[in-house]
Image (cartoon, helix red, strand yellow):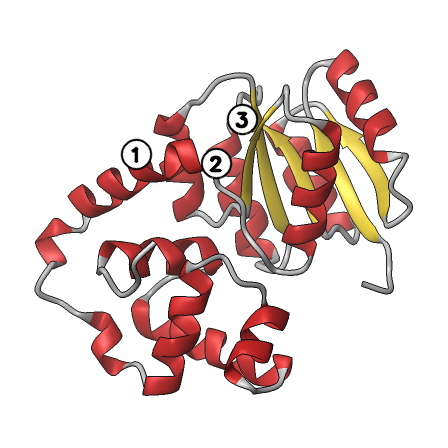
Amino acid sequence: MTSSINLLIADDHALIREGLRKILSIEPRINVVGEVTDGQQAVEFCRQQPVDIVLMDINMPVMNSIEACRLIKQNNPRVGIIALTIHDQDEYLFELIKYGISGYVLKDVHPDQLIQTILGVARGESFIPPALTAKVLAEFSRLTSVDHHDKKHSTLTERELEVLKQVAKGQSNKDIAKTLFISEKTVKNHLTNIFQKIGVVDRTQAALYAIKEKLVDL
């Protein structure tokens, strides 16, 4: 990673924002470009300024985090969003995943883990706590049970299926390229095709799809 990561902090508590800024200041690759106090401000900031990652409180005033996430991703799908919460609020998590969050962490997360999550999301990876994965999969399966007969992955090529399985195992683009003996650019091209074919918008949704359809054993 050669360039710095432009990060926006979105939280209505001043002490939380100050604490996050201090934690992130120790990582030279992360550049905190702004702080906002509600969901609407987060959406407007991302429209006006170059932002790579939004670190967003899950309970936002004025506009909730779900709507803010939807609008931010609608305006710029490449912005990575990491949701912050003080509780395992899995009822919000599924909605946020549908609209494209890349990470979900508790506010008591260890500083090193938070930084690694941000760096990972900037590389195009996703992070959902393992303790919540089962709940998300159960809800995902319930809501899509009516389409159980529709095997969208049947349209994937053999190579695309291999890439999807690696994504479900949590592999980065670099790791996938090394495993399959292809370039990272080719991996990205495959991912674009995979997302389109199975009807998802990011790696997290693709991984959940692969697990739900039992395309990979974890």
Q: What element carries label 1?
A: helix
Taking the image as shown, residue 216 lies to the left or right of residue 52, namely: left
Going by the numbered disc 3, the residue's amino acid type is: Ile
Taking depth in this image into account, of 154 and 6 the one nearest to the observer is 154
Q: Is residue 69 above or below residue 15?
A: below
Q: In this view, does 22 lie above or below 155?
A: above
Q: How far apart are marks 3 and 1 (CA)?
A: 18 Å
| Residue at horizontal 53 percent and vertical 54 percent from the top | 74
Label located before the other in sequence (1 or 2)? 2
* Quadrant of image for the C terminus: bottom left
Q: Is mark 3 on a helix, strand or loop?
A: loop
Q: Distance between the residues labelled 2 and 3?
A: 15 Å
Crowdedness near tag 3: few (<14), some (14–19) or many (≥20) residues, C-alpha within 10 Å: many
Task: Residue 126: tell me if it is visible.
Answer: yes
Image disc number at residue 101: none
Q: Is mark 2 on a helix, strand or loop?
A: loop
**3 vs 1, front mark:** 1
Q: In this view, does 120 lie above or below 25?
A: below
Q: Mark 1 points at which residue?
A: 135
Label located before the other in sequence (3 or 1)? 3
| Residue at horizontal 76 percent and vertical 49 percent from the top | 48
Q: Distance between the residues labelled 1 and 2?
A: 11 Å
Crowdedness near tag 1: few (<14), some (14–19) or many (≥20) residues, C-alpha within 10 Å: some
Taking depth in this image into account, of 59 and 75 the one nearest to the observer is 59
Going by the numbered disc 2, the residue's amino acid type is: Pro
Task: Residue 195: tell me if it is visible.
Answer: no
Q: Where is residue 196 in the image (x, y as percent from the top left)?
A: 38, 73
* Quadrant of image for the N terminus: bottom right
Q: Mark 2 points at which residue?
A: 129
Q: Name the residue under label 3.
A: 58
* Numbered disc total: 3
Taking the image as shown, residue 60 lies to the left or right of residue 211, namely: right
